[in-house]
Amino acid sequence: MADAANDRAGELARELERELSRVVRGRVDLGVTARALTTMDASNYRRVPLGVVAPRDADDVAAVLAVCRTYGVPVVPRGGGTSIAGQATGAGIVLDFTRHMRSLVSVDAAARTAVVQPGVVLDVLRDAVAPHGLTFGPDPSTHSRCTLGGMIGNNACGAHSVAWGTTADNVRDLTVVGAGGERHFLARGRQNSTTPVGLDDFVIRHLSALRTGYPQDLPRRISGYAMDALLPERGADAARAFCGSEGTLGVVTEATVRLVESPPARALAVLGYADESAAAEAAPALLPHHPLTVEGMAADLVRVRGGAGLPRGGAWLFVETGGTTQAEARSRAGELVRAGGALDSLVVSDPAGLRALWRIREDAAGTATRMPDGTEAWPGWEDCAVPPARLGGYLREFRSLLSSYGLHGTPYGHFGDGCIHVRIDFDLLNPAGVGRFRAFSEDLADLVVAHGGSLSGEHGDGQARAELLPKMYGTELVGLFAEFKDLWDPDGILNPGILARPARLDENLRFEVLPKRPVDVEFGYPDDGGDFSAAVRRCVGVAKCRSTHGSSQDVMCPSFRATGEEEHSTRGRARLLHEMLAGEVVTDGWRSHEVRDALDLCLSCKGCRSDCPVGVDMATYKAEFLHHHYAGRRRPAAHYALGRLPEWLRLAAPLAPALNAAARVRPLAALVKRIAGIAPERAIPPLAPRTFLRGLRGLRGLRGLRGLRGLRGSRGSRGRRSASGGAAVLLWPDTFTNHLSPEVGRAALRVLADAGIGAEIPAGRVCCGLTYVSTGQLDRAKVVLRHTLDAMEPYLGEAGRPVVVLEPSCAAALRTDLPELLPDDPRAARLAASVRTFAEALEECAPGWSPPRLDRPVAGQTHCHQHAVLGDAAERRLREKAGLTGGLSGGCCGLAGNFGFERGHWEVSLACAEDQLLPAVRAAAPGTEILADGYSCRTQLAQLAGRRARHLAEVLAEGLGAGPGEEG
């Protein structure tokens, strides 16, 4: 029976694909990868689609609807896939508007309007109208990746809704394709709109219910259909009635939106209160001052050490003001401070300070998915809203209800509108936990209604809350929801199970398909209880990795920025891994070609480890997958050539001059690159004629390397030595420094000596294992790392002795990969804790040392692994002390160790470099110092820009002047 059903389903899919491909000009994809990428949005829910269509225009949309209507297949419109209630998932055909229908059609600055297609990302619109002093008012925290179509579907709001309202307040008219293929123009007033047949009669027949069934004076009433907008006294506004319909009534193909004036100057008053209820009770008094935002959050959401510079308190209001000048904005912020009755306050107006504070708030949707103790927390009751005056009391009762169920959550949100976001540590992995989830949901719905609130105050009802709408609206009005939908969609193909005739809130949970037992893996996953499934579950779908308008210091996700393809985003890869574990769509487990191909363009930059709000670490997941995928099988040639680079370089070192000469012979170099799986566009980097260690031969083991002439402190510096009088630091001879850039090691010794810091090179062969890890050769990596720990064991007994690692990628591997691969070896943790960057060692061991004053601007890049794992605060302070001005770009250079050298990666590698690094270097003024501590970054700049970049140690050593007798 099951086989017959599968055969029928397969035949339906093939027939559907043929018909869709025949009539649609856009992309039709019913393959495994496309389906796996769209099983989930940012909610708790999972529904497996038949396929994905990216329409090119409204005609394509109508054609898809016609085919699906014939076959009885549902259609689900989808934007950025960041919906939190499950409305962007479905079992039929998903319409993806982010590929083709993403144009900003026109802007009329005088009329303050813009015409957009549904796939336009909000920040694209905002950036386009900013030169006119305008913006689009609603701004969800996902503004860098959410689409206008999705915002219309959910009636999205955002932090500035106290000033500029919801999306429905900012839509003038809509062009919609109905379920039957008909075109509707929706605007204010019946004479201006073309609506479904029977809609006017529906309104007339139900005037009483529409006038009395909706709660009033509730700024964030997002739940249900806004049918009351069709009342004559409300202007019969069909566009407003359509907003928030969650893809169940029709498909938006174009929208005219209103724009608002954006204040040229802004200030942020951060007000501290004893607790969140006190903050909530203070919020209404601020509204008469016309702030731009009144956002609230409590201390349990702030995970930044030292409270991120927030004022004293257990909860805070973020109250933004605007003005024509910064002084005016600050003055208005001061008024709000005086009106707020806060325990403590802070007013910030500089752009960097504003970005830093707002990032805390915007990342909350991801940060809140992990409790402070590491427990997982989930959406589901993400955004209830009550009248602002009742918010304080509601929060106290909400906390009490949580406690009665033994649950925990971290409320935050739009206090000025009475809207609260919260993620709760529901146990959705077993039936008992799911039962408690249902019971709590029912009780919380009762509590919200008792306070005159809305079950949804921002993200829509979706599957999470629609079942409970009778509690809010009563059975009569909810019955009209179904009749209203049927007028628009008589065949019921548009997003069924959402809003009208909803699915149960405890159906289709995305966790139920995952393995019940931990998967055998190589890494320890210490933050996920050793469970690979839990690590993959970290991705909740907020899709910050899909941002193309993020901070210039962010790294994540370079491959998505290069390709624009979901499968090459961190979220896309996590979705494929989830489906691999589920085994329903991706059926061949670790051997999956779909997962392998998606991970192939992952640069292992580790940017997601720091930039993803929930700390997804795709570089580690990729290494894990490659280990299992190639177990017992032949690997790509590049894995042998580049993954085992330390071994080849040791063998090649005595022959370096001859090999360098051979590499300059083009036919020979081409043959070697072909055999080794290296991109033909790449030049083979030259080997150092003399390795770093060979240059120090005979000096190893001498205390502080004092036998090396010219490296003795020359400026009366007082650095630190160990308690025994020996060298204060160990200088790690990484593979790249030793064989490819020995000048960096010599420069580092020169600077350390000037700072009075004794340095010693470890005896024995050591390696961080980076190249083995990045190619998934984890068995070999463990052997190498155990050998390294054996060699390092004599040095690990001296508590607090820093190990200075000059190559950021090697330092990151020792800091994270080493203890996660060998969690049961205590030496691994000790070595990881000893790792310091060059700047960290100087700051720690020679705090009174002053570097040479260089007084020149800098450009270049902070290594992506340094950004993600190590941090660069010490480097920034050291540059400042040396008079090296200006910042380094973020992003990834695109070479990323073995990645940029592998065949097939050239174009993506180049695109990554063009994202931030190359433009920053080209724009640098003459005399600018080009800095790049990573060997990959320096190589990329040399090969793509023809510019020599240097390690910070080299620049500082040059400033000290050459030491007498120093070896070159």
Image (cartoon, rainbow, N blue to C red):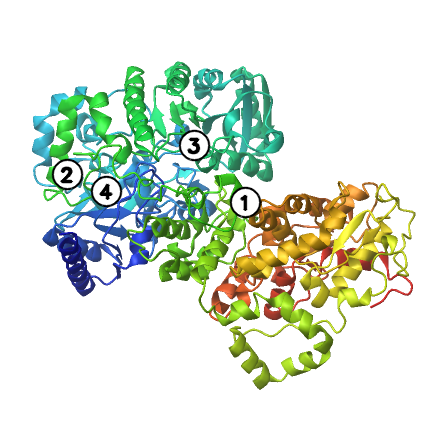
The mark nearer the N terminus, 2 or 3, is 3
Residue picked out by circle 3: 159
In space, the residues marked 3 and 1 are separated at their CA atoms by 24 Å
Picture quadrant of residue 798:
top right
- Between disc 3 and disc 1, the foreground one is 1
How many marks the image carries: the answer is: 4
Estimate how packed mark 4 is, as few (under 14), some (14 to 19) or many (20 or more) residues with alpha carbons within 10 Å: many
Q: Which secondary structure lies at badge 2?
A: helix
**Is tag 1's residue or tag 4's residue first in the polypeptide sequence?**
4
Q: Is residue 27 above or below residue 382?
A: below
Q: Image point 21% across, 57% down: which residue? A: 60
Measure the C-alpha gap from mark 3 to mark 4. 24 Å
| Disc 1 residue type (three-letter) | Ser
Please rate how many residues cluster around mark 3, counting C-alpha atoms within 10 Å: few if below 14, some from 14 to 19, many from 20. Answer: many
Task: Check the picture and name the quadrant holding the C terminus.
Answer: bottom right
Q: Residue 236 in the image: state x and y as whole percent.
A: 18, 32
